């Protein structure tokens, strides 16, 4: 019988589709979800931290805008740099860089002496967040084709959990203790949790194959199949020619991928413009409604009102629902 399957081969996709959505994917969902929570904590705090800082430092509106702007500039650069490194050296290695940076600079952010150092720390955090998407990529790679879209939706809810943690923790800490430094320190802890969880995180089997690490690819696929109770298909894993030309941005605009790339860029532009625009502008609009014109001095600054937190919860829920329907 062994001779009958001696010449048969199977692909990574064959193993994943045969295994289905089981224990391996559920565990990976929660591991990736921890990364989404940490990501959300560092991004969503931007929608309200500026008002807190203005209570301690004499900040202009332009400075508060710069704080958010530099983070997203960092994310844009980090996406390109860390995405290239992930394709070249492995997705898990980039996740390690991201998790360590989020915790170290997120925690350090709580002790900055000035606005300039705040911007520096948030810029580095933004750069690190550019690698956070590798968690979603690994999770999606290990999901069967017929579940990949739905499985992606499951991960969106962890991001929502992270934003709600920010809102509720901000409400509790700022309204009772009035310490934005304590708030930032607490919001860096999810990064520490992600650092610990990476011990159980698998590397991409596809990365192993294209980088010439055949035995490691077989090992992780066997673990997946056994955990889901299916076992590997008959035969042996099909080998691919190792390639050093990985992670090139120009490949996204090649003839085979140009249309899909441009469509995805447009979709994400529309989604992020609508979602983040609503999230970041709403607290300002509501606070102006309560307080009138915001002065440039700390003497006239006040803490965000309870209504702002309630609105943030509502806009976050709307963002999650809209993103799920759009994507």
Image (cartoon, helix red, strand yellow):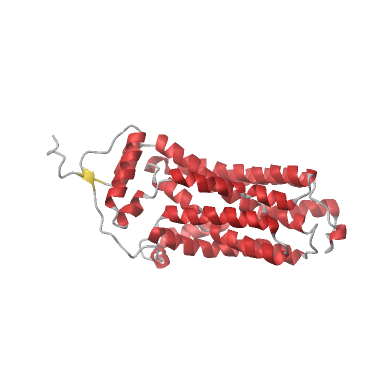
Can you tell which quarter of the image residue 10 is in? Answer: top left
Residue drawn at the location 72% of the way across and 64% of the way down = 115
Q: Check the image and report above or below for 62 versus 144.
A: below
Q: Residue at x 61, y 45 (%)?
A: 162
Q: Which residue is nearer to you in this view: 203 or 320?
A: 203
Report whether 272 appears left or right of 58: left
Number of numbered discs overlaid on the protein picture: 0
Residue positioned most to the top: 229
Q: Is residue 323 visible?
A: no
Nearer to the camera, 131 or 258: 131
Is residue 12 left or right of 106 when viewed as pictured? left
Where residue 296 appears, as percent x and y from the top left, is: 83, 64
Q: Quadrant of residue 104?
A: bottom right
Q: Identify the residue at horizontal 52%, vertical 43% (top origin).
A: 33
Pinpoint residue 7: horizontal percent, then vertical percent: 15, 45
Q: Is residue 273 left or right of residue 172?
A: left
Viewport quadrant of the N terminus: top left
Q: Position of residue 111 (x, y in %)?
A: 69, 57
Q: Residue at x 40, y 56 (%)?
A: 90
């Amino acid at each position: 019988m062994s001779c009958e399957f001696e010449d048969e081969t199977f692909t990574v996709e064959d193993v994943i589709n045969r295994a289905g959505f089981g224990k391996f994917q559920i565990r990976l969902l929660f591991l990736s979800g921890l990364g989404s929570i940490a990501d959300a904590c560092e991004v969503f705090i931007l929608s309200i931290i500026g008002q807190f800082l203005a209570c301690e430092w004499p900040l202009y509106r332009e400075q508060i805008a710069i704080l958010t702007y530099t983070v997203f500039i960092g994310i844009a650069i980090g996406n390109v740099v860390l995405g290239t490194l992930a394709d070249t050296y492995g997705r898990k290695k980039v996740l390690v860089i991201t998790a360590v940076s989020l915790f170290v600079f997120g925690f350090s952010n709580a002790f900055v002496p000035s606005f300039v150092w705040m911007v520096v720390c948030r810029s580095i955090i933004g750069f690190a967040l550019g690698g956070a998407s590798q968690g979603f990529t690994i999770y999606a790679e290990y999901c069967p084709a017929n579940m990949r879209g739905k499985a992606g939706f499951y991960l969106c809810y962890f991001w929502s959990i992270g934003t709600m943690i920010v809102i509720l923790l901000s409400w509790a800490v700022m309204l009772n203790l009035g310490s934005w430094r304590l708030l930032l320190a607490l919001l860096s802890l999810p990064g520490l949790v992600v650092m610990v969880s990476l011990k159980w995180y698998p590397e991409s089997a596809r990365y192993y194959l294209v980088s010439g690490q055949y035995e490691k690819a077989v090992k992780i696929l066997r673990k997946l199949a056994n955990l889901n109770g299916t076992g590997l298909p008959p035969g042996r894993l099909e080998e691919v020619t190792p390639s050093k030309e990985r992670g090139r941005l120009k490949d996204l605009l090649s003839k085979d991928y140009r249309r899909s790339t441009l469509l995805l860029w447009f979709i994400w532009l529309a989604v992020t413009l609508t979602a983040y625009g609503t999230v970041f502008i709403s607290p300002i609009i509501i606070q102006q409604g309560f307080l009138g014109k915001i002065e440039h001095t700390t003497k006239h600054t006040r803490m965000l009102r309870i209504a702002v937190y309630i609105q943030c919860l509502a806009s976050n829920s709307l963002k999650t629902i809209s993103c799920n329907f759009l994507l």
